[in-house]
Amino acid sequence: MKPKKLLGLALSLLFSAQALGADRAMAAQRVLRTPTHLHAPAARKPLNYTPDILLVMPNARTDKDDVQKSLDELHGTVIGSMGEGRLKCLIVKTEKGKLVETENKMKKDKKDFFCVGRDYQVEADGNPTGSAPNDPNYSSEWYITTMNCQKAWSKSTGSGVTVAIMDTGCQSTNPDLSGKTQKGFDATSFWAHMMGLAGVPSSVATVAGGIGLGLAEATNGGAQTDVMGHGTEVATSCAATMNNSVDSAGVAPDATIYPIRIANGKGMTDPIAIQAGILQAMIKGIKIINISYGFQPPFGLTNPALFPTMHAYMAFYHEIYGGIIFMSAGNDSSFDPTPNLGYVNIVSAIEPNLELTSFSNYGNCITYTAPGDGIVCSQRDGTKASVAGTSFSSPICAGIAALVWSANPGLSNRQVEGIITSSCAGTILADQSQYYGHGMPDANIAVNLAVGNFPNQ
């Protein structure tokens, strides 16, 4: 490195250290507590899946005729597909009652098939239960103060950044989402599943090896109507408008929401809808996704063995496309045996005394923790809601990422994650990582680091 560059880097690091010293000292006072009141996990519920349907990703280098020959031998019928190249995923109907047998044979065929999984059904991870903004419930938002958001807002409010909320839709008529919620995409549509997605920009098509042809966004109904209410609460936790004299203020109050409906009116989703949602996020150039869904470990969305095609899509989104995914840890009071994955940030939930909530899942897969109890947000009809669940700690972390990227749009996804991780310094002890991951992000430290473009990864 040239002397001038070395001098510049040294000065930058010195400035960052001086500017952040006081904030780090403050963060050290917010040490998370070792959990003392974890509940025994409830009896595991059965994980349902669509009968006689498999999700199959062929090896990209295998000739399509060879793949079809193998499918014919197994009496598997392709009823739809999504993606192209490395993201090609076939939706295969097996012979009636032969799903397990066909699945096992496909998994053994490493030459033709990259990964094979079932269409499992999972549910939402939440139970709806500068100067200070004028939003009437702002004073109840303890997590805004705890995560130092108000100081961060003098430098960044999330403007210019879009967060994809993959959920039950977002009610665009809600005053806290009005004017900032895009049309979005309904990934639960049969044709969205079966025919893929269209309107692919050439830059994305090049990266993804093509992302399918078929349904254009213009023909899709969008997701500006929330079919259950969960998505609106998640979205307002992340990015409720500030200073509009309504309800609450989100962590990133000026961020834009792109709703992607992945769930039905009962709050259930599947990997087909999630994969379609990830494709759509890439098509729209969106770099932050929140998914507040799961199931009791080890059967949750965190498990790549159960959801191999979905994890292949998530890994592509992070490693190749350069996006960031936040996912809720789940509310089963259970240990999650999944190792840390790297390409998805799994978020546990803490309560106001800075201890893990009694309902939050935990394990080595946890990347961060964030407030998830007594979260003030907004319901579909615009009225106040006080909710609890990792469903809300996850979008709160996504809001921190929006603040960072808004402060410095030139950062890579790895730099953003590195900054968020650095902002957690001092909040956990060594033996707490299975509960809190790197710890609780500090919005102000993160934004200051982003402005200084540090750390450089």
Image (spheres, rainbow, N blue to C red):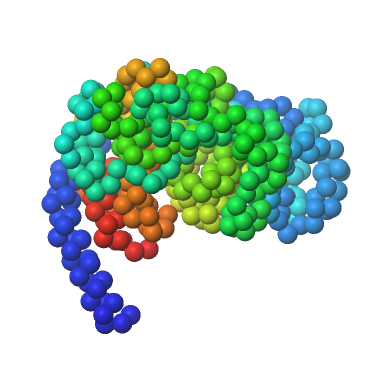
414 or 384: which is nearer to us? 384
**Residue sitting farthest toward the bottom:** 3
The image position of residue 74, as x and y in percent, is 83, 41
| Position of the C terminus by quadrant | bottom left
Q: Which image quarter: residue 263?
A: top right
Q: Which image quarter: residue 39?
A: top left
Q: Is residue 177 visible from the viewing direction of this image?
A: yes
Horizontally, residue 401 falls left or right of residue 189, namely left
Q: Is residue 101 visible from the viewing direction of this image?
A: no
* Residue 67 vertical position relative to residue 307 in the rendered view, above or below: below
Q: Which image quarter: residue 246?
A: top left
Q: Residue at x 34, y 17 (%)?
A: 383
The image position of residue 343, as x and y in percent, is 48, 50
The image position of residue 101, as x and y in percent, is 77, 36
Across the whole image, how many numbered discs are drawn on residues?
0
Q: Residue at x 20, y 70 (%)?
A: 11
Horizontally, residue 376 falls left or right of residue 58, namely left
| Position of the N terminus by quadrant | bottom left
79 or 99: which is nearer to us? 79
Q: Residue at x 16, y 49 (%)?
A: 23
249 or 417: which is nearer to us? 249
Q: Residue at x 82, y 31 (%)?
A: 95
